[in-house]
Amino acid sequence: MANPLITVEELKDILGNEDMRVVDCRWYLGNPDGGSSAYHEGHIQGAMFASLDTELSGDVGPGRHPLPSPDDFAKFLARLGISPSTTVVTYDDRGGAVASRLWWMLTDQGHKRTSVLDGGIQAWISDGQALATDEGQPQVGTFRTRPWRDIVDRRAVVSRKDNALLIDARALERYRGEEEPVDPKAGHIPGAISLPQTGNLADELTFLPPGVLRSRFANIGITGRDTVISHCGSGVTACHNILAMEVAGIRRPLLYVGSWSDWSSTDLPVATGQQP
């Protein structure tokens, strides 16, 4: 498995290599065209754009951002020129909050050569690197997919064992039920531990050191758990916590893809406040 994070210096060394692809995953809640607009205004040289709403999500499934079918994902990767040997670097402008979704999808499919740009496009710009406006035109790739593996559905969350740990990557205000900008109900899944994905990052939107991340996860009682399930609003920023666990050297958890957008659309119980 490649290092889950790549630095600007490391990216500069490989940028432009024939069998590597850079993917811009910028996306903004409530502004579905914002990511594409930002991409066209300026992106890392050779980068191609991935839409969270239409390419990293499917049309059918639980929650706001269900996974696409493996066949549809394979077709998308082929259009980007991604094959099993391709090195893939993903980035956004939110410290990897969205780019980690594509990282998770690729790694769940067994693709080992994939990383998230640490610090995102801001780190690239801060290093004095120019942005491009032309779109990459790669050769068509070939990628054979398989069924999604490290996922659970709502029923599995409901029936989880007492030793399972359910972590919620959303902002604390949404977890406590003080605000809910998009989903049907405010609050959190009873028993879920609040672990906002922003806590994985330093002020520069780079990931905290592995040892610090290990302590963060240890402090919520992750050690010795039979099962760990990561979720968020719609199965996107939950991948950021999964990425942080991999950086920390912790066993990969499962992803509840439907997440709160799925749970809150039912009559299942809802908790509010600070406590699980």
Image (cartoon, rainbow, N blue to C red):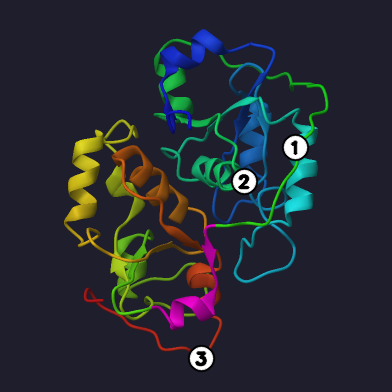
Which residue occupies 78% across, 50% down?
72
- Secondary structure of the residue carrying tag 2 is loop
Which x, y percent locates residue 109?
62, 46
Do the residues under discs 1 and 3 have CB atoms within 8 angstroms? no
Q: Which residues are magenta?
A: 150-160
Q: Which residue is mark 3?
A: 267
Residue 184 seen in the current view: no
Q: Amino acid at mark 2?
A: Gln
Along the line of sight, the residue nearer the viewer: 184 or 79: 79
Residue for badge 1: 143
Q: Secondary structure under badge 3? A: loop
> Pointer 2 and pointer 1: residues touching (CB < 8 Å)?
yes
**Residue 209's quadrant in the figure?**
top left
Percent x, y of residue 46: 67, 18
Vertical position of residue 150 compared to residue 178: above or below: above
Q: Amino acid at mark 3?
A: Asp
Residue 46 highlighted magenta (yes or no): no
For label 2, count other residues whose C-alpha is less than 10 Å away and answer few (under 14), some (14-19) or many (20+). Answer: many
Q: Position of residue 136 (x, y in %)?
A: 74, 21
Q: Residues within 10 Å of mark 3 (few under 14, many from 20)?
A: few
Q: In the image, is residue 127 above or below residue 156? A: above
The C terminus, quarter of image:
bottom left
The residue singled out by tag 2 in the image is 109
What residue is shown at x 62% (from left), y 40% (from top)? Answer: 35
Q: Amino acid at mark 1?
A: Phe
